[in-house]
Amino acid sequence: MLLLQGALIVDGSGAPGWTGELLIDGERIAGMGPALHVDPAVPRRDCHGLVLAPGFIDAHSHDDAALIAAPAMRPKLTQGVTTVVTGNCGISLAPLVTADPPPPMNLLAREQFRHASFADWRAAVNAARPAVNAVGLVGHTALRLRCMRDLSRPATAAERDAMCALLDEAMSQGAAGLSSGTFYAPAAAANATELLALARVAARHGGVYAVHLRDEMAGVLAAITEAADCAYRAGLPLVISHHKCAGRAQWGRSLQTLALIERLSERQALGLDVYPYLAGSTVLRADLADGLTPIRLTWSEAHPGLAGRWLADIARDWACSEPEAVARLQPGGACYFQMCDDDVDRILTHPLAMIGSDGLPHDRFPHPRLWGAFPRVWAHYGRERGLLTLAQAVHKMTGLTAQRFGLMDRGLLRVGAAADLVLFDAERLADRADYGEPTTPAAGVAAVWVNGGLALDGHTPRARAGRVLAKPVGRPSRSPCPDSSAQ
């Protein structure tokens, strides 16, 4: 047992904080109140001047392989993150075995694609004893690679059936839902029939559907509608991944996208995640090298020593165009400075928006969101700019995310809930990672508990008590939309 005393308790619900005490007993919160009557022999920790909140939940990670290969999970733990949602954007390790994963699957560690089932991946993560918990989605692209030889067309009925069988198995083994990324070439040919068939499998198991939209640029409104219609017809909650309006021609269109999302949310369960930066990061793509978007290389197998340099400078040194430089750098990844402040502000502060880092832990020179996304939400958007209260910022990183993913005993401080906790200094909490020094740990996190175990004390890692969480239960369900034309 451990009694935490004198903290400002911000419980994750969005309600204002209050000063009091919290008792940890084993993996659970055993008591909360202004002053608890506890045996004097119980150890105590003085938390005066600090904030005690639920451990942050990363709604959008690509930590599938990092949980196994680097189970200390320092980029997330040092931010106060206690649970990561993996398998996003259609990209998941399971159920796929391959030695040569194509883009964007190679955003995950190449050598880790050896898990033929979700149960295999879950066992590997648990055996590694990660420092944080994980919630696993199954990637549509991984299913396509497993079941289809020709990815340039929609799946046949037999291929759909094979993918649905694998997803059904994974959901029965504890997967939390389905993700897709039709923005990327291996899944771009998937049609509504293919996606709906899989979404209906996830729906039968009470899962979620997280979508990297087909288009975040000129066609963003149509892409939102496509994803929402699929989730609505299948009867499961939708999460729009890393919502943005990408490219200068789209700046300001969040007024339209958020209005559409609000209208859609009146008919169906719908949310979105967002990271607190103007740049995104993904694989190197020549079609994004438009000469207008600043692009910074994060990794290149052909030229690893160039990681961290601007693409424009590389192209100038090579006396070639940016698309030509992209071709010579392949395979690789980059940061793309595609967004504007007004859109990010508007999206991040929207009531439906939760926080996901979208960090890429295997990049040689990663986007700073990997190490700094969660402290930045409060430090930059709350404390510095006044766009969020402390309670609102914590809610977006905890209670709202737990609700979206059906994590019934996480994300809120209450008696009986899992003791996933972060203790931090609200005046000092800050992201210190930037584009020049992207792996600098955050400041201001005093301690982190995962499943009741002290995981981080100041800068010192302690016990690794994370695991793949059991499939969420208790999510409100809705019957699929009647649709006689759907197969």
Image: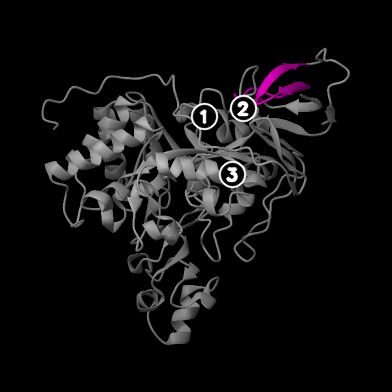
Of the residues under marks 3 and 2, which one precedes in the sequence? Answer: 2
Residue 152 percent location from the top left of the image: 18, 57
Name the residue rendered at 11%, 30% in the picture: 485
Residue 65 percent location from the top left of the image: 48, 52
The residue to which callout 2 is attached is 12
For marks 1 and 2, give the one nearer the viewer. Answer: 1
Q: Secondary structure at mark 1?
A: helix
Q: Which residue is more in the foreground, 235 or 408?
A: 408
Find residue 180 and report its image quarter. top left
Name the residue rendered at 56%, 46% in the picture: 128
The residue to which callout 1 is attached is 402
- Residue 341 visible in image: no
Circles 1 and 2: CB atoms closer than 8 Å: yes
What quarter of the picture does the N terminus occupy? top right
For marks 1 and 3, give the one nearer the viewer. Answer: 3
**Magenta region: which residues?**
11-33
Q: Is residue 20 magenta?
A: yes
Residue 357 percent location from the top left of the image: 53, 47
The CA distance from mark 1 to mark 3 is 20 Å
Residue 12 percent location from the top left of the image: 61, 27
The CA distance from mark 1 to mark 2 is 10 Å
Q: Residue furthest top?
A: 37
Q: Which residue is more in the foreground, 227 or 305?
A: 305
Q: Is residue 307 magenta?
A: no
Q: Residues within 10 Å of mark 2 (few under 14, many from 20)?
A: many
Of the residues under marks 1 and 2, which one precedes in the sequence? Answer: 2
The residue to which callout 3 is attached is 130
Q: Secondary structure at mark 3?
A: loop
